[in-house]
Image (cartoon, rainbow, N blue to C red):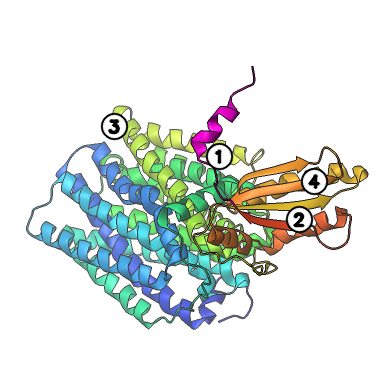
Amino acid sequence: MPADSQSPLSPLRHPSFRLIWTATLASNLGSLVQGVGAAWKMAELTPSEGMVALVQASTTLPIMVLAVAAGAIADNFDRRRVMLAAQCFMFAVSVALSLAAWFDLLGPWSLLAFTFLLGLGSALHLPSWQASMRDLVPREDLAAAVTLNSMSFNLMRSVGPALGGVIVASLGAAAAFGLNAVSYLVVIYALFRWRAPVEDRNLPAEKLGSAIRAGLRYVSLSPNLTRVMGRAFLFGLAAVALMALLPLVTRDRLGGGATTFGVMLGVFGLGAIGGALSSPLIRRTASIEAIVTGGFLGFAAGTAVVAMAETLAVAVPGLMLAGACWVLALSHFNVSTQLATPRWVVGRALAIYQTMAFGGMAIGAWIWGWVAEEISIPAALYSAAVLLLAGAALGRVWPMPDLNDVNLDPANRFNVPALRLDLKARSGPIMVMIDWDIPPEKTGAFLALMAERRRFRRRDGARQWALLRDLENPDIWVESYHAATWVDYLRHNHRRTASDAGNWDRLLELHRGPGNPRVHRMIERQTVPLQDDLPLLEPEA
């Protein structure tokens, strides 16, 4: 393998990544064959355009609903075991689906139920798989590894749908579902072989509810992540129209069958492979915003071409262009999410990103299916193309962040203080007060840094943050915040990144007095019943 990290194949130099990536080729082949079988089976079971579009929605909806919980699981438990559990679950569902199809027990709603269950397995698997990239490759190969994952799927897309069309046409949907079940066994074998690095967890795992709230809080207070995820949602909402309506384009516009549908998906996959292979060169010559904007514009053009096509030859260029732009946009959304997120919360951030992207796809599949049924297929595709153009224009006011120089490795500056009280992990609430001595001429700079510090504190779990000024000595400022328990206080400080530490360093330059600011760590004790204090809260007469 080339040693140059800019090579699209550089992650394959790492044996662990090569093992898992090779297994995903088989899994992606099975999933694509299953997708062809499910979409075409639904087209046979019902003439409703909306029901056909819902096959796509039923797969992506669970990712939108459950991915955040799955991300919390990925951050708090052994990711390898989580992925094994998800793969075993999807294997069992696929076996049941193939048996139901073989014995002709499937109806439109039962088919949607099975695809929904497979979506549940994917929702559990994906955050752990995406977050494991940092265990499989170093940072310099991360972008190429994410792109290779997309390439893996689309490499199989170039042959899988065509193979799926042949299998469905000759052997029936049950055979396609059975092949998918076998493909999960390959991934299960690879995961058993992989020896993932064991993370040193000094603190107990967070409870699921607290972990979910921590992930949501981190993303909502991180401007870089909100921009990435907002653009990803819009792209998924609009771009899914082409994939959701492709069976109807094949059947009603081109007059083709399952084989033609498979060929069209294969062409889309070939375009995606081209986009993946060209990604390193494009990254060297264009900014990430230019790449994402190009993805929106190119997919809009490809969608418009397919909307006007009445023959397969006309649709092919549009599908190839759309495929290339699909992988370029989504892989850069994914990489940006990982680079903008520290290790402790990366699974949850990726899950929220997937919720936004796949949630947009699930909503979009329903919207464009309804437009196609009520108006026409071309009207739905043209409307989606217009929305993609709006997404490109949004980059003028909401650009993608440049994260090349952001260091989110742990700062490792916090030392657990020596306590004279015997605290338990659950002891609390904890109140922290930090005394700052700031000269009057530096007040403006101090307040600007404290505004940034407030966001860091709240993002990492601090509650009731406040900045107080001493009335008798105005040069003294007190920063205060709460943590629910002692272990929450420790988590809060261990979450500090090297990038965040720069804020502390600049504040120290403004602080006057010997040594660092004095830190007071106190535990609250309620000595008077709360109801006895209530009259004190009433205003004086």
Q: Secondary structure at mark 1?
A: helix
Q: Which residue is mark 2?
A: 503
- Label 1, on which residue? 391
What is the three-letter code of the residue carrying label 2? Asn
In front of the other: label 4 or label 1? 4
511 vs 380: above or below = below
**Residue 528 in magenta stretch:** yes
Q: Along the horizontal axis of the image, is 62 left or right of 217?
A: left
Q: Which residue was labeled with disc 4?
A: 477
The spot of residue 233 in percent (x, y) is: 49, 44
Disc 4 to disc 3, how far (Cα)? Answer: 64 Å
Q: Is disc 3 placed on a helix, strand or loop?
A: helix
> Which tag is nearer the camera, tag 1 or tag 2?
2
Residue located 30% across and 62% down the image: 31
Binning the other alpha carbons within 10 Å of mark 1 as few (below 14), some (14 to 19) or many (20 upward) gives: many
What segment carries the magenta color? 524-541
Judged from the image, the secondary structure of the residue bearing numbered disc 2 is helix
Residue 375 falls inside the magenta stretch: no
